[in-house]
Image: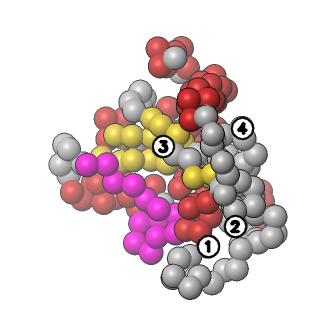
Amino acid sequence: MAYENWCWSTHAPSWKDAWEMVQKVDRPNVGLCLDTFQTAGGEWGDPTTESGIRDHPGGREGLEADFRRSLEELSTIVPPEKIFFLQISDAYRPRVPFNPESDEQGLRPRGRWSHDSRPMPFNGGYLPVKEVTEAVLKTGFRGWMSMEIFDGGAEGKGKEYDDLNAFAVEGMQLLNKLLEECTLLYDDMKEIK
């Protein structure tokens, strides 16, 4: 079983919260599903602000420093064999910040953002996907990964996909581009091509 944090969750919004639960369960068949959107969208991005990033008492510099520390901690404390899956997606920065209140269905802003605004890396998003991917690879993880795309377009109103084969090919090309940009330990990942 792969436990995934959701950045809009009340119980386990961060990778570290999910990791603490996996440690408490302490079973060989329970590990993590890490997700570039859930990590970067929870710790760095914020769809309710003009800038698209979280407000931080230390400003952008403080936010960046905290985010780097979190990723360094992930790369040093989580054993690679406890990462069962890596999901990769980016997010569009909303042109107009989301209302910070829950919607009519009770969904929080990051949940709404997650459902409609998650393109492939390098396709209009702005989250630090590469940095999260590098942190996961620095653990020694060489397991399963996929693109998890919920792309309703930059406006979140929907997007047509007429040729799913071309979409899949583009996904693979962009995954390989991401891995190439994650120069760390890339040589032993090339077999996924």
The residue located at (38%, 58%) in the rendering is 18
* Amino acid at pointer 3: Gln
Q: Amino acid at mark 4?
A: Phe
CB under 8 Å between discs 2 and 1? yes
**Residue occupied by mark 2:** 47
- Disc sitting over residue 122 in the figure: 4
**Is residue 161 inside the magenta stretch?**
no
Mark 4 or mark 2, which has the lower sequence index?
2
The reply to whether the C-beta atoms of the residues labelled 3 and 4 are less than 8 Å apart is no
* Label 3 to label 2: alpha-carbon separation: 20 Å
Q: Residue at x 45, y 75 (%)?
A: 10
Contact flag, marks 4 and 2 (Cβ < 8 Å): no
Label 2, label 1: how many angstroms apart (C-alpha)? 7 Å
Say how the picture is coloured.
secondary structure
Residue carrying label 3: 87
Question: Label 4 neighbourhood size at 10 Å, few (<14), some (14-19), many (20+)?
Answer: some
Task: Tell me if label 3 and label 2 are in contact, CB under 8 Å.
Answer: no
Residue 51, how many percent across, how many down?
81, 64
| SS category of the residue bearing label 1 | helix
